[in-house]
Amino acid sequence: MALPRLTGALRSFSNVTKQDNYNEDVADLKMKRSKLHEQIVGLDLTWKKIVNFLNEKLEKSEMQSINEDLKDILQAAKQIVGMENGKEAIENAAAFLFKTFHLKDSVGHSETKAIKQMFGPFPSSSATAACNATSRITSHFHQDNLAALFQMTKEECGDRVLFGNNLAFSFDMHDLDYFDELPINGEPQKTISLDYKKFLNEHLREHSTPEVRPVEKSNDSFLWCEVEKYLNATLNEMAEATRIEDLCCTLYDMLASVKSGDELQNELFELLGPDGIELIEKLLQNRITIVDRFLNSSNDYKLQALQDNCKKILGENAKPNYGCQVTIQSEQEKQLMKQYRREEKRNARREKKAGEDGDISGEGLTCFDPKELRIQREQALLNARNVPILSRQRDMDFEKIRYPHVYDSQAEAMKTSAFIAGAKMILPEGIQRENNKMYEEVKIPHSEPMPVGFEEKPVYIQDLDEIGQLAFKGMRRLNRIQSIVFETAYNTNENMLICAPTGAGKTNIAMLTVLHEIRQHFQQGVIKKNEFKIVYVAPMKALAAEMTNYFSKRLQPLGLVVKELTGDMQLSKSEILRTQMLVTTPEKWDVVTRKSVGDVALSQIVKLLILDEVHLLHEDRGPVLESIVARTLRQVESTQSMIRILGLSATLPNYLDVAAFLHVNPYIGLFFFDGRFRPVPLGQTFLGVKGTNKVQQLNNMDEVCYESVLKQVKAGHQVMVFVHARNATVRTAMSLIEKAKNNGQMSCFLPTQGPEYGHAEKQKYQGSPYENQDHL
């Protein structure tokens, strides 16, 4: 349904109708507007006029050097206006520069001010170049010839005046004389004056009683009247004259002070309360008038009387009746004062209603006893003496910093008041306990997964560009963690720190950053392979070999080469030049980047540095990793080049410190995912082995380990057993084999005969220890 329009109502209820014989096309309107625009633009000096003038006045031999100067002026105008503007704007700017510098030899203060006022901040070199080029052009002419150019422009303008330029405007204001008497309804006998003071005096004279003649009322009727209205409205009864005088005296002292309006507004609000907002507004608006009227009063005895009244008030009581006072109240006292004001308002409404009905009954009006209020206040003060000062919790807690991509339930729990207060910690619900002579077992179930957020959306491979689809061929979509990280990893150059559980897909996140770097060097369907290098730092040689195979498989459709650079795998310079991604160890890359010559070119074209297992900073190899990061950051600062750093870790408690070390913006590039984001939920079982001596504890531990391993193997799961020392590996393996033979359960551990078994059987002879043959 269309909304009603004013034009429709005019057409319906008046003789205003639309013109019916309008046949002009839109193209005609555009043509008229373009002609009018050209006519207005042609009134001033244009670049076209300057070029035509030069062609007419100079010979062809001279125009060759002049054309170079004209190009310099256009280039300077382009730098001042901006490269993104069109040809018309640049030519208008060039004409303005020519007009500004045609009589100048250098860029002065007035010329700089004119250009800055027209275009804003500009490079001084451009203005200097334009001034020099204009000087070289004007050197071919006499000053009279240049004056003819500008005189010709003025003649073309003629007497044409743009709309609005011939309108005279005056700032003079014509006020109506308030002494003039205005007739009312054509009757001259009933007149009203615009003199507000006269009106107030007459109004007060009619309503004033002869008994009460306060001093302030005759002095300043406006202040007296407003104070009287305020007291009548707040107290709901006729205010006493002495009370009005006291308040007028206090208000006048405050208005006559040297304090600013804001300070005076706060003090007046503390004095008069919320009910006096209208009075405060009127007093501040008429502050100067009130003070001037009082000071310029012709009756000196009135001023003396008011001053005597103020001295009398101050003499009777050292504290003024009205002033800026600070009152300290407890919560109970505030509630009592609210109750007192509520009762006063209720009584006032009852009195008003009874007065209208004309029937006032003493039983219907209940007065609020001030003695009872005083007793309750004294009791509240006594109770406040026994209450600790810091017993109540603060109303406003400190604002807790919240990072958008940090999902750390433990950190959130540590911020709660119960944890800070040292509350007793208990195990979660749903645990299972088992206690026997050999061990005590506690099973903790896996935690519930993190609920899917409203803004979380899975990223499908088919929605990526061509490079992303080729690299992730065979995958349908990214998992949850990879989808959360996708926008920052794939579309920005931000440094990143990823903390996610094992098996969450951190390697694919590294692949997203690799593809982003490749896309930056992808132009016109060709990847410029010689412009970038990507370095992946893995903690161990075995992991480096595994990552080399993974990235080689993924990047092979793109024609990129991935090589391993470790102590065992050396590369020649030609091989390094043909390689776009290097997988290395911290020690090897530290040696490469320490060299002052030779491999400097290699380190300078590195655009992406991926640090896997960045939590090694806390271990023995931490200084090596730290030196790599520090050297990379130093290179970024010294060369002003962009080297992106990506840190990957599974266990990193102080992720904020590591993010600051890697120069990661915690609001954009920091991602922390706790155990709730595990692709496979992780349950925990704690076994406390019992035993009187150390040997018995070891035997019991082997027995419990065998039972747990057998249980998992029978369920069809794979099992990994970690021990505390390297020499305990062989002993534990031999213990498991012996127990399986004694119990006749070797069939549960025998592998199936397949190609993987044959490959493992070949590898057992490559190791030096002969125990490997027995273990297999």
Image: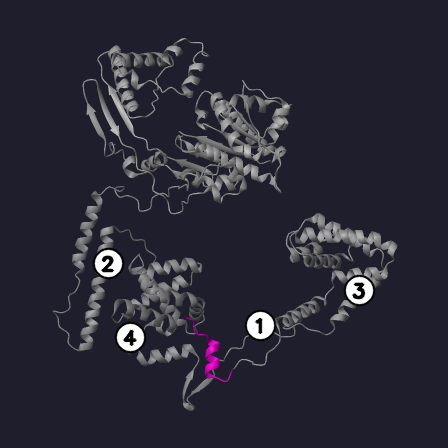
Q: Marks 1 and 4, how far apart in space?
A: 48 Å
Are discs 4 and 2 less than 8 Å apart at CB? Answer: no
**Disc number placed over residue 212 in the picture, else none:** 4
Residue marked by disc 2: 338
Are discs 3 and 4 less than 8 Å apart at CB? Answer: no
Residue marked by disc 1: 171
Residue 674: x percent and y percent?
Answer: 37, 34
Disc 2: CA contacts within 10 A as few (<14), some (14-19) or many (>=20)? few
* 11 in magenta: yes
Q: Amino acid at mark 3?
A: Leu
Q: Amino acid at mark 4?
A: Val
Q: Amino acid at mark 2?
A: Lys
Could you tell me which quadrant the C terminus lies in? top left
Residue 203: x percent and y percent?
Answer: 35, 79
Q: Earlier in the sequence, mark 3 or mark 1?
A: 3
Residue 38: x percent and y percent?
Answer: 70, 67
Q: Earlier in the sequence, mark 1 or mark 4?
A: 1
Q: Marks 2 and 3, how far apart in space?
A: 84 Å
Q: Earlier in the sequence, mark 2 or mark 1?
A: 1
